[in-house]
């Protein structure tokens, strides 16, 4: 699991924006992975993808648990802007290689899909909340999130060759 620590921590930091919380999330991810190891299916995803999925869910749970009130629109817009803007070198080092690749790929998909993915994956919003924030139907929000994630995933797989 040591070889996955950087990627897990990098994604946790990019979602939580808090190094201390990201450390807690990373530890929780490996505990969850250990407990669920028997359910891992190599045919469905690589170990890294499986761990990053657990990381995303754990980080969003942690952010939501800390959030006493819904995030206001201005904060969400800052989050979208910060995620879709090319990172400075220091931030890039914190994100880790896979996180940085994913952020680059987000900038290559249609903006409405990238916004939906960032609001859901980084902002922790549900599809319903993304729809409300963007002023679109829930079904459209779900489609944008799903299609955006598929395009990012496919571009990253194509890059790995």
Image: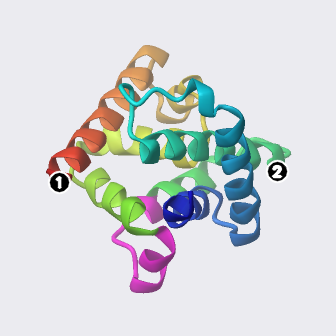
Query: Residue 117 or 155: which is nearer the viewer?
Result: 155
Q: Image point 35% across, 45% down: which residue? A: 114
Magenta-span inclusion, residue 43: no
Q: Image point 37% across, 67% down: which residue? A: 97
Figure coloring: rainbow
Residue highlighted by disc 1: 159
Task: Write down the region rendered in magenta.
Answer: 81-95
Q: For numbered disc 2, what is the local secondary structure?
A: helix
In this rendering, does residue 78 appear at all? no
Magenta-span inclusion, residue 86: yes
23 in relation to 156, above or below? below
Q: Image point 22% across, 45% down: which residue? A: 157
Residue highlighted by disc 2: 66
Residue 38 placed where, x, y %? 61, 27
Query: What is the quadrant of residue 68 in the picture?
Result: top right
Mark nearer the N terminus (1 vs 2): 2
Quadrant containing the N terminus in the rendered view? bottom right
């Amino acid at each position: 699991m040591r070889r996955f620590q950087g990627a897990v921590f990098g994604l946790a930091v990019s979602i939580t924006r808090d190094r201390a919380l990201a450390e807690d999330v990373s530890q929780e991810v490996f505990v969850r992975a250990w407990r669920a190891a028997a359910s891992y299916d190599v045919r469905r995803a690589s170990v890294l993808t499986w761990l990053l999925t657990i990381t995303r869910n754990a980080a969003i749970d942690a952010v939501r648990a800390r959030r006493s009130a819904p995030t206001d629109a201005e904060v969400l817009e800052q989050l979208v802007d910060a995620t879709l803007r090319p990172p400075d070198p220091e931030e890039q080092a914190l994100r880790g290689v896979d996180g940085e690749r994913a952020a680059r790929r987000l900038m290559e998909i249609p903006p409405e899909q990238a916004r939906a993915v960032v609001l859901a994956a980084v902002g922790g919003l549900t599809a319903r909340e993304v729809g409300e924030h963007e002023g679109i139907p829930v079904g459209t929000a779900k489609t944008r999130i799903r299609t955006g994630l598929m395009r990012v995933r496919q571009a990253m797989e194509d890059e790995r060759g």
